[in-house]
Amino acid sequence: MINDNDNSPITQLPNALTLCNITMGLSSIITASFGNFTLAGLLIIIGAIFDRLDGHVARKYRVTSEMGKQLDSLADVITFGLAPAISIFLLSFTDTIVLGFFMTVIFVTCGAYRLARFNILNYQDVFVGMPITAAGFLLALLTLFQTQMVIIHPYLTAVGMLLLSYLMVCKREIKKV
């Protein structure tokens, strides 16, 4: 683990990649607000690539830090919590706004809770509950599916969001791959 005050370029690369992840999440939210749900979903997927790279680079160069861990969790709430939930809300719940509001709040708060729990637990080979990255990625795929194939009924989307929310906060252990 490195000192959080080390500012050499290689030590800052994982954080720079995490900031790219945040940028993808925020860009997805803005893009969805203008109705371009295909691009919004793709930006979340690109955010997942940055999320994977930041951890890989940090481990490869042994430059993990507490700052990086916290920044990564904040990025995950934006890119895999807020961005896919808002995209689905704007795409799927136009006629059922109250339902969409509750599903969005539940999904994001469960994701934030799961990340907070992850940050204080010290499991090496397992996740406890579904990672928010996986849940958000699945919502992004649902967004892309709906823009390219067929619109899914809002009640079915709500059931899917509830299931993903539950899977994030449940205490089931999932082996890391």
Image (cartoon, rainbow, N blue to C red):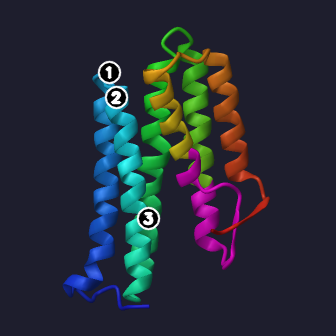
Q: Quadrant of the N terminus?
A: bottom left
Which disc number belongs to residue 52?
3
User: Residue 102, which numbered label?
Assistant: none
Q: Kindly report which numbered mark, 3 or 2, lies closer to the viewer in this rendering.
A: 3
Judging by the rendered image, the residue that carries numbered circle 1 is 35
Instruction: Give the magenta-colored segment's residue range.
Output: 114-135
Label 3 CA crowd tier, 10 Å (few <14, some 14–19, many 20+) = some
* Circles 1, 2 touching at the beta carbon (< 8 Å): yes
User: Please, what secondary structure does the residue beneath circle 2 have?
Assistant: helix
x and y, in percent, of residue 134 in the image: 57, 51
**Which is nearer the N-term, disc 3 or disc 2?**
2
Q: Quadrant of residue 28?
A: top left
Q: What percent of the width, then of the height, locates residue 83? A: 42, 40
Task: Estimate how packed mark 2 is, as few (under 14), some (14 to 19) or many (20 or more) residues with alpha carbons within 10 Å.
Answer: many
Front: mark 3 or 1: 3
For disc 1, the neighbor class at 10 Å (few under 14, some 14 to 19, many from 20) is some
Residue 124 placement (x, y as % from top left): 66, 79
Query: Looking at the picture, does residue 147 appear above or below residue 50?
Result: above
Q: Which residue is mark 2?
A: 32
**Distance between mark 1 and mark 2 Cα atoms:** 5 Å
Amino acid carrying label 1: it is Gly
